[in-house]
Image (spheres, grey):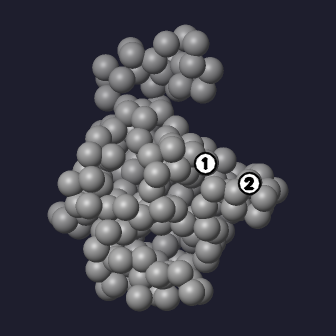
Amino acid sequence: MTDTANPEQTALLVMGYQAGIVGNIADADALVPRMADTIAVARDRGAHIGYVRVAFADEDYAAVPATNKLFSRLAEGRPMHADDPATQVHPDLAPRPEDIVVRKTRVGAFSTTDLARRLADRDVTTLVLAGIATSGVVLSTLRDAADHDYRLFVLADRCADGDAEVHDVLTRKVFPRQVDVITSADLPALLG
């Protein structure tokens, strides 16, 4: 890799790596330790770490309109409560006090959070995305972040989806139109 990014202006966003979501992905037992290694590399190089989790407080369920096909079904069943251990960041990837942690109530990481402000407070201009699911939080966050003019990288091997074919189409054909798709092996060189 010839591209480099200033680690002090870079954030690795770890999205959807929650106890209740990771278990729905094939090869989760191998994916979590690999993500832990990737977080360690980013920390070692001086990058910021941000965690994005989906979880609902009682008032969040009530605020979901019937017009929202995905989240109105969630609101009816009331899963993914903010206090439920299944909505917490996977314990093997636990955030540190200096990390950014946001709780979202929609698909994208920016839509219902103060993530943009928190990144701006740290002068972050480059994002490295990793997440579950590729067709959900990664796709939505990538599109929104591109519209906000972040420099973007997606770690294809640290994203996962319930549909491997969808993951492949997104990371090989769709994402490269807007971002650089790399692997975790490229991260040390990217961060210098």
Query: Going 57% across and 87% down the picture, which residue do you hit?
Result: 2
Query: Going 32% across and 46% down the picture, which residue do you hit?
Result: 115
- Tag 2 and tag 1, C-beta contact below 8 Å: yes
Q: Position of residue 123 (x, y in %)?
A: 26, 61
30 up-or-down from 144: above or below: below
Q: Position of residue 17 (x, y in %)?
A: 47, 58
Query: Going 57% across and 65% down the picture, which residue do you hit?
Result: 154
Q: Secondary structure at mark 1?
A: helix
Q: Position of residue 31 (x, y in %)?
A: 57, 71
The residue type indicated by label 1 comes to Leu
Q: Which of the numbered marks, if any, corresponds to residue 103?
A: none
The residue singled out by tag 1 in the image is 139
Q: Secondary structure at mark 2?
A: helix
Asked if residue 42 lies left or right of residue 157, the reply is: left
Crowding near pointer 1: few (<14 within 10 Å), some, many (20+)? many
Picture quadrant where residue 71 is located: top right
41 up-or-down from 134: above or below: below
Asked if residue 138 lies left or right of residue 124, the reply is: right
Q: Label 2 vs label 1: CA separation?
A: 9 Å
Query: Going 36% across and 69% down the picture, which residue do you hit?
Result: 10
The residue singled out by tag 2 in the image is 174
